[in-house]
Image (cartoon, rainbow, N blue to C red):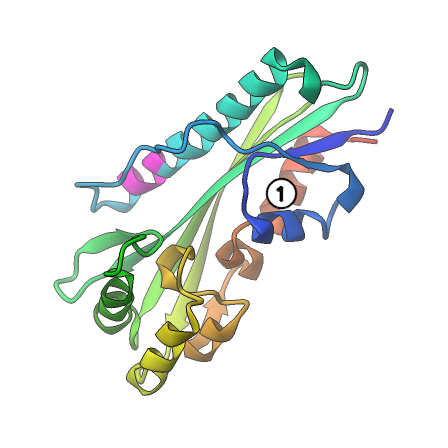
Amino acid sequence: METRFILASRSPRKRDLLGLVVPADRIVVVPPREANEAGFEGLHELGAIEGRLAEIARTKLEDVVDQLTSSECLIVPGQPQIVIAADTTIVATDCDGILQVIGQPPEGDDWKEAVRRWFRDCFAGRTHLALTVLCVRAPDGRAAERLTKTEVAFIADVEKNLEWYIDTGEPRGKAGGYAIQGAGSIFVSHVTGSLSNVIGLPLEALLSAFEELGPFR
C-alpha cells in the first residue's frame, strides 16, 4: 500500500512545497491541536534560539503522531504514514547588535508598525537568517531531524517601496513580515542557502531525511 505523507501544518506554502517532491494526492494535512507554542522571549543567543525552535517542531510532530494514534478516522489500516513537521523563524540583528527573533506580524492593528520597524531597524542593508527545524517520522517510528539556515540579504533602500508593500497586505502571516516568493522579493539582494527554506519548507533537508529513513513506496 502506498505511503501517505502527513503534513503537520495548515500552511498552504508548506503543502505546495511538499507537493513538489511527493505525489500531491498522497498528502494529508493534520494540523497540531495546540495552537500555543513556546516563545523566544529572552533568547538572544543563536544556540538557544535553535534549541527552542527544535522544541517547537518536535512538539508539533508529537501532537500529530498522537492524533494519528488516537483517532480511527485518520488511520487507514495497513497504510504506512510519514509525519512531517517544521517550524521556521527569522533571526536578525537589531540596531544595537542584539539578535532578535522575528516571527509573524501581530494580529492587531499595530501589525503595520511592527513590519516598518523590522524593515528599517533589522533588515535594510543587512543580512538576516531564516531558520527551520524539520522533523520527519517514518512509519516504523524512527525519526530524523534537520536544522537549515539560510542567509537573506536586503537592499539598503527599503523605504522607497515599504509603504506600498505594507499596503499589499502580503506581510501578514509571514515570518519576518515578508514573502520572498511574492512581492517581498523586491527587497532581497541575494540569498545564500536554501530558498525553499525561506518560503517555509527546506526541500533539500526533507529529501535528506527521506533518504535516511526510506525508502518509501
Please provide percent x and percent y for residue 60. Answer: 47, 30
Residue of label 1: 206
Please provide percent x and percent y for residue 143. Answer: 58, 25
Rendered view: 4 above or below 78: below
Rendered view: 160 above or below 141: below
Magenta residue check for 207: no
Judged from the image, the secondary structure of the residue bearing numbered disc 1 is helix
Please provide percent x and percent y for residue 196. Answer: 57, 57
Magenta residue check for 49: yes
At 38% from the left and 30% from the top, the residue drawn is: 55
Please provide percent x and percent y for residue 153. Answer: 39, 71
Residue 98 shown left or right of residue 107 in the figure: left
Q: Residue 108 occupies which quadrant of the picture?
A: bottom left
Dominant SS in magenta: helix
Q: Amino acid at mark 1?
A: Leu
Q: Residues within 10 Å of mark 1 (few under 14, many from 20)?
A: many
Residue extending furthest front? 109
At 71% from the left and 49% from the top, the residue drawn is: 19
Q: Which residues are magenta?
A: 47-52
* Front residue of this view, candidates 212 and 83: 83
Residue 178 shown left or right of residue 1 in the figure: left
